Image (cartoon, helix red, strand yellow):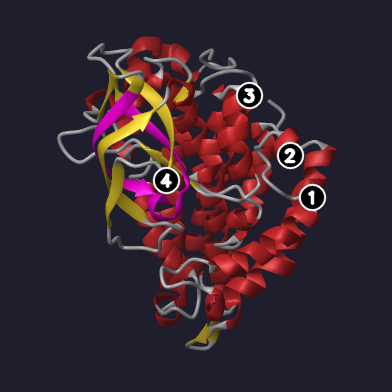
Amino acid sequence: MDFTLSPEVEALRRNVRAFVAEHVLPLEDDRANWDAHENIRTDVLAGVRAKARAAGLWAPQAPKQYGGMALPVVAWAGIYEEAARSLFGPLAIHCMAPDDGNMNLLARVGTPAQQDKWLAPIVAGKVRSSFAMTEPHPGGGSDPGMIRTRAERRGGKWVVTGRKWFITGAEGAAHFILIARTSDDPRRGLTAFLHHKGQPGWKILRRIPIMGPEEHGGHCEIEYDGLEIADEDVLMQVGDGLKATQIRLGPARLTHCMRWLGWSKRCMEIAQDYVNRREGFGIRLADRESVQIKLGELAHQIQIGRLLTMHAAWQLDQGARARKEISMAKIQVADTLHQAADVAIQLNGARGYSKDTVLEWIYRYARSARLVDGASEVHKMVLARFLRDEGRDFWGWGSGESA
């Protein structure tokens, strides 16, 4: 459990740090580079992505044969956190959700033909992708077993009917991974399908307004009304949809944590810089004990989150599912991101509440962290079940639950 990064990964981490400082932060600083939904303009993104590819800093999680770096999960932890010093850093080096999780799933379980057709264009940055699972009530959310969208066998095809919502990136996506019900079996009733935006039988009903800021493509409500999918576009086997969901969402939750830690550190960086300069009543804010306590506590919580995240990453690299470790990391880091933005805004005063810094952007984004990929309460329930089943062994030092 030595979390020291290898010399090769440490060199990559430092290269990402330098790349973000030189090529990404200057883009973020100029609001002319932002789109109407408070993300980087796609034409500006294309330019910085070309630089990232040229620098050998492209798609850390993706297979090498498609242009990625094929790094272990522990390396992701170091690199993603560093990329997320900027709001746009993970996008620049192609490790941002939802493409990040979709690439990882397709790389792990897609057939060679499926990887050529569906994965390669995503890795290359030619298309964006989306993961269509969550549904309006009474359909599935944190509990995939409640999914009601159905795929029925008709005339040699799978015909899909149903509705999804809050599907991240759907408006701009070309490739979709869809989870639909193919039987009422409690464990093998779901199946994962692949479909393209150009296929008939589905439509985006609306781009749902949110607190923001938004990923490219927003968060959309989708209706499926007769979408036909061929057998060759079934991901894994019929009935493996729940397994596909688990394979995708575990690492995806952890990569959220990696990026959130980078943004948490950015909040602290902005706060520290300001209190070092700002004076009030004859003393620098940085010299006030109350300010030091706030910053010290925040640094403490960020480091706890980093260790939990790295531990879970290490377990994944050992072949474990690391379900309880990922849940612990997500609870901690989601709370820490919100705390980091809140403390930094408080210390910056009106400046923090304004758009003169990125703190208010991070603050709004942070509220979603306790909801996406499973609400914090659900993850605490997961931990309670493990504690009930494992007793004192809950705190063991083993490599975790086997995959």
| Residue drawn at the location 73% of the way across and 41% of the way down | 67
How many numbered marks have been drawn onto this rendered protein structure? 4
| Residue 81: percent from left, percent from top | 62, 50
Q: Is residue 86 visible?
A: yes
Image position of 311 (left or right of 294): right
Q: Earlier in the sequence, mark 1 or mark 3?
A: 1
For marks 4 and 3 on the same chain, the one whose residue lies earlier in the sequence: 3
Viewer-side label of 2, 3: 3
Residue range corresponding to the magenta coloring? 158-180
| Residue 51, percent from left and from top | 75, 61
Comparing 44 with 319, the one in front is 44
Mark 1 — residue? 56
Judging by the rendered image, the residue that carries numbered circle 3 is: 112
Q: Residue at x 39, y 50 (%)?
A: 170
Q: Which mark is residue 69?
A: 2
Secondary element under disc 4, as helix, strand or loop, is loop
Residue 26 versus residue 310 in the image, above or below? below
Q: Is residue 165 left or right of residue 9?
A: left
* Residue under the point 51% across and 73% down: 34
Instruction: Say if the magenta span includes residue 192.
Output: no
Above or below residue 153? Residue 93 is below
Residue type (three-letter) at the residue carrying disc 1: Gly
**Of the residues under marks 1 and 2, which one precedes in the sequence?**
1
Label 4 and label 2: CA atoms lie apart by 28 Å
- The type of residue carrying mark 4 is Lys
Q: CA distance from mark 1 to mark 4?
A: 30 Å
Label 1 with label 2: CB-CB less than 8 Å: yes
Number of residues whose C-alpha sits closer than 10 Å to that of mark 4, classed few (under 14), some (14–19) or many (20 or more)? some
